[in-house]
Image: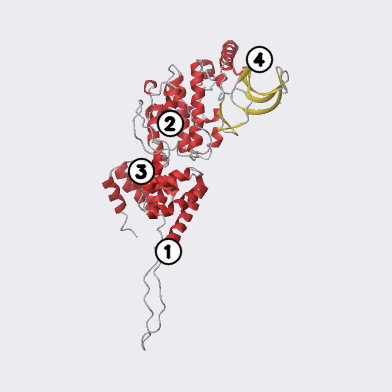
Amino acid sequence: MLEQLGKYRIDSVLGKGAMGTVYKAFDPNIARTVALKTIRKELFGDSQHAELVSRFKNEAQAAGRLMHPNIVGVYDYGEDEGSAYIAMEFVEGTPLNTLLAAQTPRDLSHSLGWMRQLLSALEYAHSKGVVHRDIKPANLLITADGKVKVTDFGVARLDSSTLTQTGSMIGTPSYMSPEQFCGELIDGRSDVFSAGIVLYQLLTGERPFSGSATMVMQQILNQTPVAPSSLNLALDPALDAVIVRALAKRPAERYPSAQAFLDDLEALLGTATGTWTNAEIDDDRTVLIRPNQPLSSGVTPLPTGTAAITEAVETLTPWKLAVMPELESLLSHQIGPLARFLVRKSLNGADDFDAICAALLPHIPSERGREQFASASQSLFLRLNPPTAPVEPPREPTAIEPPTEVTRTTETVPAPLDPAFSQMAEKRLAVLIGPIARIVVSRAARATSLRQPFLQLLAEHIESEAQRLAFLTSFESLP
């Protein structure tokens, strides 16, 4: 391994790529650990060398002027015979793509806190004339205290034909904007598009565009991705409008800046003062309830404070008030303090115990957690509603009638979900909502293993109340 690069002592390799290597190094002059990102000169011919080095140095200088808490700082630029390098701030953090590897939605509070930091960093960079051009989870480091650090600003604008001819594209297909694929002029709105993809992935656990590079390009240029609230039933559909605008194909129809994107997110969540944190939600001020007034961008904000929750609780029926604290306790073991709000919202939106539990299940991210909650909630139901049946008094046996034991009726066991039932439900649902039924059924099947909660989850996607009722009724005669 290389031992020295310029004045820097090389301690270890942090990563390798097609164009160079990133090292953990030490600056002896000021006793500081740094990250050294190198570009291998041998990748380019003599005629291209001068242009490459000039652009690399200019971009390092531009990035060096970006002094922002959510941007990895650039300290120095240097060259030796074999490579050019940039000395950057060394950050102890986990790349966001590692956190997203499980392909499950991330906690809403954490996701929006990270997005606030990302968009703030982009707004600052754009104000200094620097466009990143490769925003993706792998370039976002998350520190132990939840801070976002945007990396690779130092080489972000190296998108010349020189680099393209080597087979290396600056930008990652699944996160590139339409104008990047078309070779058009790039500005800050391209980063907005990429940030919208990151938000989509945080909220759903899935990328909106996936497949081979050719397939991704066709999707980004021509297709509208599935609404996030259809993939994550825990999301308020109001978030869909924000993401739709961030992912608009034409830059003119997109958010004009990262700040405008952030403004709509903050207004949507009732936090226009910018008081988001990365901690767990511990009150009702940053959760989604119901829309009440339009925004200038066409997105609908939500009310804040505890008044709406308090008023809703006062209208609950006695049996709901009785079950509320125990349901909150069961759900809090799975998702934390947000359980309080979700249980109260579900109690107001459903009229029977099974429907309430079905509405809560999608908020639990892990399959094991959903199974535990479903089992515990059924035990709670049986404890609060023990099976009862009239018991006939014992009769004296006759000469021809042997003595009989007193028997009780048993409670009906909830019907389990099976593949045949799921396929039938998908066909019936597709008639009402179209091809998206396949995704809705798949998500619901992962959320519950019981038929009734499964059907309730599907019915939530049917807009017409009459069609929703007919859909549910069509399954009542099945064994």
What is the crowding at mark 2: few (fewer than 14 residues within 10 Å), some, or many (at least 20)? some
SS for callout 2: helix
**Residue 79 shows which numbered tag?**
4
Q: Earlier in the sequence, mark 1 or mark 4?
A: 4
Sequence order check, earlier mark of 3 and 4: 4
Q: Which mark is residue 215?
A: 2
Q: Position of residue 246 (x, y in %)?
A: 41, 27
Which label lies toward us, 3 or 1?
1
Q: Nearer the viewer, residue 111 or 271?
A: 271
Disc 4 element = strand
Is 240 in front, or is 318? Answer: 318
Q: In the rendered structure, which disc, 2 or 3, sits on the residue that comes first in sequence?
A: 2
Q: Are marks 3 and 1 in contact (CB under 8 Å)?
A: no
Q: Amino acid at mark 4?
A: Glu
Between discs 3 and 1, the one toward the N terminus: 1
| Outermost residue toward the bottom in this view | 399
Q: Few, some or many C-alpha atoms within 10 Å of disc 3 (few <14, some 14-19, many ≥20)?
A: many
Q: Amino acid at mark 2?
A: Met
On the image, numbered disc 1 is attached to which residue? 386
Categorize mark 1 by other alpha carbons within 10 Å: few (<14), some (14-19), many (20+): few
User: Residues under labels 4 and 2: Cα distance?
Assistant: 39 Å
Point 40% across, 45% down: residue: 345
**Mark 4 vs 2: CB contact within 8 A:** no
Whether residue 353 is visible, yes or no, is no
Residue 360 in sight in this render: yes
Question: Which mark's residue is nearer the viewer, 1 or 4?
Answer: 1
Q: Which residue is mark 3?
A: 437
Distance of label 3 from label 4 (alpha carbons): 57 Å
Q: Nearer the viewer, residue 438 or 211?
A: 438
- Contact (Cβ within 8 Å) of mark 3 with mark 4: no
In this view, the mark in front (2 or 3):
3
